[in-house]
Amino acid sequence: MNEQRKLLKKIWGYDTFRPLQEEIIDSVMQGHDTLALLPTGGGKSLCYQLPALSREGVCLVVSPLIALMKDQVQKLNDRHLKAACVVSGMPSQTVSDVLMSAVGGALKFLYVSPERLRQQKFIEHFRRMKVGMIAVDEAHCISQWGYDFRPPYLQIAAIRVYHPEVPVIALTATATPAVADDICQRLEMKDCHRFQSSFIRPNLAYMVLNDGNKNHRLLRIVRRIGGSGIVYMRNRSGTQTLARFLESSGVSVTFYHAGLDAAERDRRQEAWMKGRCQVMVATNAFGMGIDKPDVRFVVHMDIPNSLEAYFQEAGRAGRDGEKSYALLLCDSSDVERLYRDIDIDFPTVKYIRNVYKALCNYYRMPVGSGAEMQYDFSIDKICAAYNFVPREFYSACKILEREGFISIPELEDTSSTLYIPVRRDELYRFQVNHQRMGDMLQAVIRIYPGLMDCAVPVDERKIASRCYTTPEEVVQMLRQLHEMHIIQYRPKPREPQIIFLTERIDERLICPSEQYYSMLKEAAQQRIRSIVDYVSNGKECRSRQLVSYFGEQSETDCGVCDVCLRASRRPSDVTSAVEQLLQKGPMGAQQLVQMLASEGYEHVGDTVREMLDRGEVTLDGDFLLRFAF
């Protein structure tokens, strides 16, 4: 492993590996199929990127997350490693150029979505590639028991036949024992070497807090804990409303969701990352790929749909090893909402078929045509034309996307692409004769070193900052260069897009059998039951509950979760009485003592002082007693 350590230092700048990374890399280097279960922030990408450099051929990376693929490609290119991705919405010629670059050996890493594996064009190129290894990111998506099952992942085993000697590494942060077994089986792994780091986070205090007034409880949490934090909400409008509430209470806060334009999202993310604002209120669109070590708290204002999703999002707190909190706020309506939404998330097969038919008719697509076609996608207009309810319609579209018929990338997942097809000598002559545009091209080549091999995603704002100009002027010059046939430039679409991945088929062939579909729905219901059990279980250590769900047994309680803290208190009727009163809201100390004394309780003042000393209750600015959380 001396060579691997040299690469680690030379390319990534690290002196040592994180736990299990070295063992995983060694397994892949020896040609073994490998399953790596590492927590969020555990360094999964290095486990395939580093050994890929020592193996001859391209590393094929299968990932369902377009934004994360683009981020990984950019980071690899920044390290002068040739990488590219093929994502939905790319022009057919651009896709062909990227695949030919991989066939010709110009790429070391090729990132693709699982849906791409079904397409004949990809298969034809893949058979001709010199492949060194295959990496499967978010590998839990291959399991029907996983919380984000994606049927196109099943195609990975089918393409292995073209390169049977190539090792496969599957990576995920969240997999139960059943899902881990399913991953190995579905990928047809031979003598699979499994590595699983501990799910125990000793510095992270898990809290489940029942409160009818979540906003005020959140405000107390923010003030009590301090430091940087993330607050997750289910819907976009809620993020803005909650951010306004916190801001009006003196908290430095911003909000983030997929409906904001890319420039605004980047500004808000940068402000939070650099500590210019304390709290980020966001939907689950935020956080993937974010590596901020000093997040002191992650708060969920709604119960997530699964323990896997909760564990992954909560795990973004305390990556620096310092004391941090993962808090889940709930009230009596949350559980009802979870079970109610399951019917919306899983519409009937008949309804899904009707949505598919309506989509094809709306875009005037005959049977047998439409593959790789891309259109502006307005949910409101389509629902108005065919009398669909938007929420149910979108759920059906997401199932069609999961089944590999369409793709609906969020606007942040789409970007401009750029390719320089001319020879270097031609480019040099152009730069000499057109200094201003030539200087910009030189800057672009430095930022994106792979764009002379194939089309790559580009960010006009980043180019503008390097060239000391405006994004609008960059776009204007790129369009002019495109017209001059110096580059091939495809601007980012302004509207949401829908891409038909396959030609139109008879809608009666859409979706699995009723029995299979019902099984998927039951698996989702079971995940909801698991997280409801977690929320409802106030007797067992939260950390032990979580790690047990993922197949790990902890011999000791964490000592810092809400369950452990309650168990550690001195049994006292007075303490319980104080808790019950303060659960209803803040109260003055004198009023509290008088109320309990009138009911026959003794030593109330002493008990309150002890609770203050232990940090279980606090005094606010109005000298009212409140729960610390």
Image: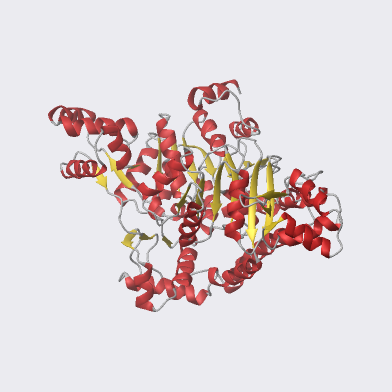
Q: Nearer the viewer, residue 606 or 90?
A: 606
Residue 437 is situated, as x and y percent measured from the top left of the image, at 18, 34
Residue 122 is situated, as x and y percent measured from the top left of the image, at 41, 49
Q: Is residue 50 left or right of residue 479?
A: right
Q: Quadrant of the N terminus?
A: top right
Q: Residue at x 52, y 28 (%)?
A: 54
Q: Residue at x 54, y 71 (%)?
A: 344
Q: Residue at x 19, y 38 (%)?
A: 486
Q: Quadrant of residue 178?
A: bottom right
Q: Quadrant of residue 594?
A: bottom right
State whether residue 397 is above or below residue 54: below
> Is residue 457 visible in the rendered structure shown here?
yes
Q: How many marks?
A: 0
Q: Is residue 407 left or right of residue 180?
A: left
Residue 296 is situated, as x and y percent measured from the top left of the image, at 60, 42
Q: Nearer the viewer, residue 628 or 112?
A: 628
Q: Quadrant of residue 257?
A: bottom left
> Is residue 614 visible in the rendered structure shown here?
no
State whether residue 132 is above or below residue 528: above
Residue 338 is situated, as x and y percent measured from the top left of the image, at 61, 67
Q: Nearer the viewer, residue 80 or 579?
A: 579
Q: Residue at x 85, y 49 (%)?
A: 570
| Residue most extreme to the left | 433
